[in-house]
Image (spheres, rainbow, N blue to C red):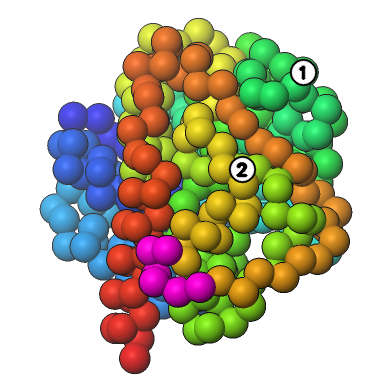
């Protein structure tokens, strides 16, 4: 059994991770400040099963509160830092919030970990750190020096900060670059969830660009397995940051995403088009080789099967709300 501290525990990925870690026999401490980016009730529902578990403790706290974080840690804890202000497009308008939460928050968590003698950490990064100039498929040894949004820059800053700390202190960090994570409990502002809601309500779906932009969609179940594998790996990892792509390894176009969703819902999509907004890239595709070789991680979920699981959850959640 390992003791895990999971920040952002009530969120989309965090709540799935908490349940999987408990099922695997770990002790889990969850932290979340219920940031108002979306409805608190949704996050509380995410944790409803976990809060009844005897090996789970939950604390409502802000990761920027170094003292609060330090109090929850001991030297044997593995920190899994998922908490962040997410999303590319809002990061332009909410620039200072993104930097404060994503960079200062990561610094506070890292400092608290070091204060408590923690030497192992998993950091949730993003495929957006690669920007537009990195050749496809994205490899972790690419420079990643030209992010095209404040969100991407904040995640790359977190990686660089942790790497500098690791070199100086021995902190061992797996930085997982998540690629377009989807699945049950997905945040309501994300594209797949938005499209599903519009399709279910008979509304037109607006695609930015001409619909040919491709994303490497990754099912949350595969992401959770990668996080747990990375947490195990940090026991013998080198000091500093080692980056890993966590991807589906089978990119699909936006148009294919919508038609797959529509098929699972049993509807015909009405697709409209709009100009590509600032910060969006035309393609993401990850090379999974490092995660496969080092972590023993391979994506298992077929995209159409993953979409079907999401739609089943969406329909059940929608029925409960009505």
Counting from the top left corner in percent of width and height, residue 142 is at 72, 17
Note whether 134 is above or below 190 in the view shown. above
Q: Is residue 147 left or right of residue 69?
A: right
Q: How many marks?
A: 2
Report the residue that reaches farthest toward the bottom.
322
The residue to which callout 2 is attached is: 215
In this view, the mark in front (2 or 1): 2
Asked if one can make out residue 109 in the rendered structure from this viewpoint, the answer is no
Measuring 55% from the left and 60% from the top, which residue is drawn there? Answer: 258
Which residues are the magenta region?
Answer: 263-268
Asked which quadrant contains residue 22, the reply is: top left
Identify whether 160 is placed above or below 24: above
Q: Quadrant of the C terminus?
A: bottom left
Q: Residues within 10 Å of mark 2 (few under 14, many from 20)?
A: many
Give the camera-side residue of 62 and 40.
Answer: 40
At x 18%, y 48%, the residue is 55
Secondary structure at badge 1 equals loop
Q: Position of residue 185 (x, y in %)?
A: 40, 62
Q: Which residue is mark 1?
A: 143
| Direction from residue 300 to residue 207 in the image, left or right | right
Q: Earlier in the sequence, mark 2 or mark 1?
A: 1
């Amino acid at each position: 059994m390992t003791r895990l501290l999971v920040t952002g525990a009530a969120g989309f990925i965090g709540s799935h991770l908490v349940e999987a870690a408990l099922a695997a026999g770990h002790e889990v401490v969850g932290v979340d400040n219920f940031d108002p980016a979306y409805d608190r009730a949704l996050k509380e529902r995410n944790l409803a099963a976990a809060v009844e578990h005897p090996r789970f403790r939950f604390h409502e706290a802000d990761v920027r509160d170094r003292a609060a974080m330090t109090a929850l840690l001991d030297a044997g804890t593995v920190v899994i830092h998922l908490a962040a202000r997410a999303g590319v497009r809002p990061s332009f308008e909410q620039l200072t919030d993104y930097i404060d939460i994503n960079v200062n928050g990561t610094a506070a968590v890292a400092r608290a970990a070091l204060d408590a003698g923690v030497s192992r950490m998993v950091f949730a990064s993003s495929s957006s750190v690669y920007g537009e100039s990195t050749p496809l498929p994205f490899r972790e040894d690419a420079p990643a020096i030209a992010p095209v949004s404040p969100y991407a820059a904040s995640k790359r800053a977190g990686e660089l900060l942790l790497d500098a700390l690791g070199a100086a202190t021995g902190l061992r960090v797996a930085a997982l670059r998540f690629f377009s994570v989807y699945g049950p409990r997905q945040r309501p502002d994300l594209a797949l969830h938005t499209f599903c809601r519009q399709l279910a309500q008979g509304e037109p779906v607006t695609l930015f660009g001409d619909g040919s932009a491709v994303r490497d969609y990754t099912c949350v179940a595969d992401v959770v397995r990668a996080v747990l594998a990375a947490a195990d790996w940090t026991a013998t990892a080198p000091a500093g940051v080692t980056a890993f792509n966590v991807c589906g390894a089978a990119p699909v176009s936006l148009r294919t995403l919508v038609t797959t969703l529509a098929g699972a819902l049993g509807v015909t999509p009405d697709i409209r088009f709009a100009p590509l907004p600032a910060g969006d890239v035309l393609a993401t595709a990850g090379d999974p080789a490092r995660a496969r070789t080092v972590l023993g991680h391979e994506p298992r979920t077929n995209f159409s099967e993953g979409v079907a699981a999401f739609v089943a959850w969406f329909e059940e959640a929608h029925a409960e709300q009505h």
